[in-house]
Structure formats: C-alpha cells, structure tokens
Image: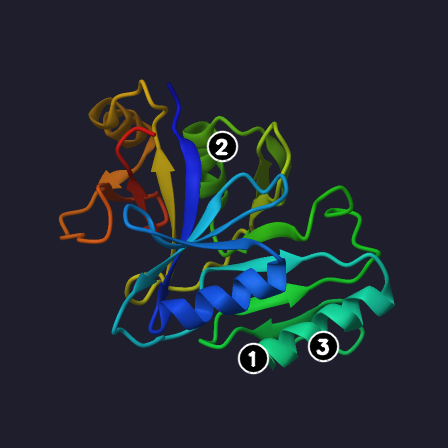
Amino acid sequence: MTSHLFALCFDANDPPRLARFWAEFLGWELSDDPHDGITTLPDDDTGFHIRWLPTHAKRTGPNRVHFDLTSTSLEDQQHKVARALELGAQHLDVGQLPEEDHIVLADPEGNEFCIVGPDNKFLADCGLIGALSGDGTQQVGYFWSRALDWPLVWDQDEETAIRSPHGGPKVTWGGPPVELKTGKNRLHFDLAPPAHGDQQAEVERLISLGATRLDIDRHDTHGVPMADPDGNEFCVLTPR
C-alpha cells in the first residue's frame, strides 16, 4: 500500500530554537519524542509532522522548497508578519516587486517563507500552511503524485501541484528553469508505509516510479535514504 507523508524534516543548526519558533508561530504542539526527535505536531488538517534534525552544515543557498502561509485580510497578513518578526524572523529580499501581494521572510536560520495576501484564490480553501512551494520540474510533480497517490490539482505550462484527498497544504513545483542543486537539501520528506506495510516493497515501488536509492549513511531515522527524479532527498521510514 502507498506510503503516507509522515513528516517534513528541516536540517537545523539549533533544532530546539527553530522548533520553538515554528511551534509558536503556527500554534502547534511541540514534542521531544525519543523515536522521532524534536517534532511539531499539527492541530489542523495539515496531515504531517515537522521534524527538526541536527546538522553542523551551513546554508549554501536558497532552499528548494518553502512555506506559503495564508492570510484572511490585509490586517491579518500584517499581524502574522509582525508576529513572525517578534519571534525572530527577518524580512528577505529575493527580488519581489512592490506590487506583489506576498511578503517574504526568513526564519531564525534563514529558511525562506512567504505570507501571501488574502486575495490568493489558489490557496483560498487551504489552512495556515497553504502550500509547500517548490522549485522543480513537471516530471517531479508527476512522480510525487504517483508516490503519494495524491491527485494533481494543477498541471499547466509545466507547473504542477498536488494535494492530499483529505485536504491540507498543496505541494507545488514551478517548472523550468530549475536552479542547479548544490549540496544536500535542508528540507526533505519522510514517507512511511502503513503499519501493516513493507518498507522494502515500498522502496522498490518508488524506484519503479523514478526514484533512486542513495548510498549515504543516515543516523537520524530508521529509514532508507532516496532521491526523487530532480535529486531531492527523501527517506522511507519503517511502517507506522
């Protein structure tokens, strides 16, 4: 049976600090579980945890994926920006134009995120985390649609988006040109087969869809490290 998206993982130089920032900003519960490490747990239909994994590596450039967070009014957007800044975020200039309705910020470790305006129709029916917005090809959108068994909700001009049938954030890829990957991504997905599933069978299924198995040592999970067709790392955990 198809794996589910168990967690979005952030590599962090200071996991407790970054976890506190996002737990307080999102209003999620913070957990320090001996099995899953420092984790923030959703209180809505997001459907996945956020895990914070220790690393000594420094950022080498922009992340390939970032949060698009929603707002209900211009006042709400400004309130969320002010709250993020109060918790330790900073404004970030990525070349956005003054007339664009999203505000770009970076969390305390420089991970980019946007707070979009209230008129964004694409995210109108989403929760606070409206989307995981990614830099990627049409092929990788098709791969993740099949890997997670999530339907495509956008497929136009090589831009793709998928969403769980149960709701939650959309996952989007902007199509070409795709920035050259340099080093390991600081964000990756953890997939998990269901409790009665088979980890190795799931690894083989994902390989048949276009993934590759990575020959790297991973001490932070009980998982198999893999990469999608665009080279983005992810991990297949033991069934749960």
Contact between labelled residues 3 and 2, with CB atoms less than 8 Å apart:
no
- For image coordinates 40% across by 74% down, the residue present is 61
**Hey, what amino acid is under mark 2?**
Ser
Residue marked by disc 1:
88
Of the image marks 3 and 1, the number of the one nearer the N terminus: 3
In the shown orientation, is residue 203 left or right of residue 148? left
In the shown orientation, is residue 164 left or right of residue 237? right
Residue 194 vs 210, above or below: the answer is above
Q: Residue 35: x, y in percent?
A: 28, 46
Considering the numbered disc 3 on the image, is that residue within a helix, a strand or a loop? helix
- For image coordinates 72% across by 77% down, the residue present is 82
**Hey, what amino acid is under mark 1?**
Gly
Considering the numbered disc 2 on the image, is that residue within a helix, a strand or a loop? helix
Mark sitting on residue 82 = 3
Q: Badge 2, how many Cα within 10 Å: few under 14, some, many 20+? A: many
Of the image marks 1 and 2, the number of the one nearer the N terminus: 1
- For image coordinates 19% across by 46% down, the residue present is 214
Residue marked by disc 2:
145
Considering the numbered disc 1 on the image, is that residue within a helix, a strand or a loop? loop
